[in-house]
Amino acid sequence: MPAAVKERTRLRLPALPRAAVVWLICLASALAALLVCSLSSPLYATNDWIDANAYLTIGRAMLHGQVPYRDLVDHKGPLLYLLHMLAALVQPNGFFGVFVWEVAAGTVFCRWAVKLAALFADGPAALLAAPVSAAVVYTLPAFSKGDSAEEFALPLLLIALYDLTRVMLDGGRPVTRGMLLRNGALAGVLFWTKYTLLGVHFAFMACLFVELLAFRRQIARAFAACGWFLLGMAAPAVPVLAYFAANRALGSLWEVYFYNNLFRYSDLTGGVLNRLIRVEMLLSETLVNNGMLGAAFFAGVALVALCARLPVRGRLYLAVAAGCAALFIWGGGAYWDYYGLPLAAFVPLALAMLLPAVPQRATGWLAGALAAALCLVWVWIYTPNRAQMGLRLEDRVQTRFAALINQTPDASILDWGAVDSGFYTAAGLDPQFRYFIHTNAEGPEADEARLAAIRNGEFDYIIVRDFDDWEGELPENYQVLLAHYEVVTVEYQETEGVQRPYTLLRRRAA
């Protein structure tokens, strides 16, 4: 290839400071934001989110030989539990190990935000993408309390958006094998973490296939690209399937992670049109409830539409990526506030389009330091969790109940009626019962198994949330409970803005 042609095919990235300095800026941005925004941070007593506690409980139990799905039932992906198993190595009875993972994921997210911004803006301006992205994304209500699968997915989604944007810039860049393998592997990680997060990667490969086939007329390369992507996607499956096969748990993996999620958790009723309308409504609700996300979303749509450096089809590809993300997230009909967080991967794209408009005099080191300071002020003001910063661990009902439970050596406990409220972690005990928590994807066999275990007195203690005064006759489940267990104490504690009663019950003497 002639040197002049070869030069034109290279993407000229603006000059940036040394890579180590950029990584340090990204680390500082993620660390500062997450210290204030995540309840897993050392600035908070604990993360009281029920899902986060369930992940840590399973991760800790894995260290002691238990296998997800076979021994303990929750319906998230196995790689999320692996991450929490590694976190439990750092701190088994707290969330500091989780916080380390959050900072690592946040640093990668900020680094690729800078890389994406550097495609459109000069070096100093591009660096602003790190603190601004961290400040906007981690203060969103969809971020919730931290430690969601969606949070850990953000850097993986952003890498795909960066590569898709880079390929389409200035008339088109090469689609390389390494890029396809990398994004395929990241898609595989998402598949085994939470497969409703695969929308962006599905769009990534579909759009590149159309690009190679229809616009670049490279038919063989289009099909080969799909093969390389799928090869990368298959890589994470090998150790996952080997682990469950070695533990004779492939059937449990299918039952809980696939069947229960598809047919018990998702609502697949209604026609295609009705489901698309439902997706649009849930997307709109998310953008309204997350004001900065909504602003970035609409600003990004307008700026991408006007971006002359992207061909029209490239702008369409990015729109397809956003649409597929929403379709995969809400196509099953379920909705929780944190489900919309993956859309925050598009925030750095909006920033990348905005940063070229920043005056040159506003991108020096002094101005950058001022901007970073303003981001810290933003984080401190707008994090939804700061009110919990002054709470102490010893004042929590979990700590007080744990002191009573641990008076019984090697006590067995059941957290009944809710997802994990943190009692397993506070007491330092692993569950010894498959249906150790209530999940939204379980069938009637789970409650039947719990009631049978209660009748048999298999637990030393049972903790029930929201078991309070009843008007009229007690529900049958609670009649069975009180026939075999006696109330030790009842305490109230605010959880997610609601004063909830927590009841500790002890097995009745024979």
Image: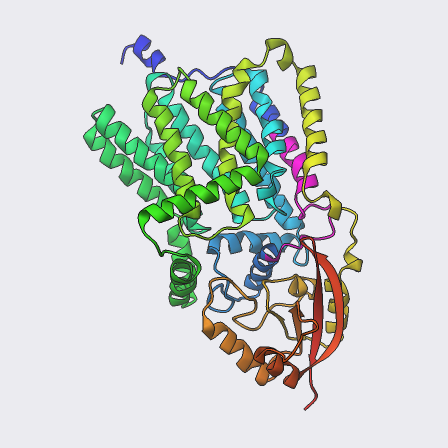
Q: Residue at x 76, y 67 (%)?
A: 491
- In the rendered image, which quarter is residue 249 located in? bottom left
Q: Nearer the viewer, residue 97 or 398?
A: 398
Which quarter of the picture shows residue 41? top right
Compared with 238, 304 (above or below) is above
- In the rendering, at what x and y percent does residue 156 appear? 47, 39
Give the percent coordinates (x, y) of residue 368.
Answer: 66, 19
Residue drawn at x 75%, y 77% as measured from the top left: 488
Q: Nearer the viewer, residue 209 or 137?
A: 137
Q: How many numbered marks appear?
A: 0
Residue 406 visible somewhere in the drawing: no
Could you say which quadrant of the image residue 404 lies in?
bottom right
Query: Residue pushed farthest front?
Result: 472
Q: Compared with residue 197, is residue 353 higher up or lower down, i.e. above or below?
A: above
The correct choice, above or below, for 459 with respect to 1 in the image is below
Residue 290, compared with residue 423, is above or below; it is: above
Q: Report if residue 28 lies within the magenta region.
A: yes
Query: Range of the magenta residues?
Result: 26-50
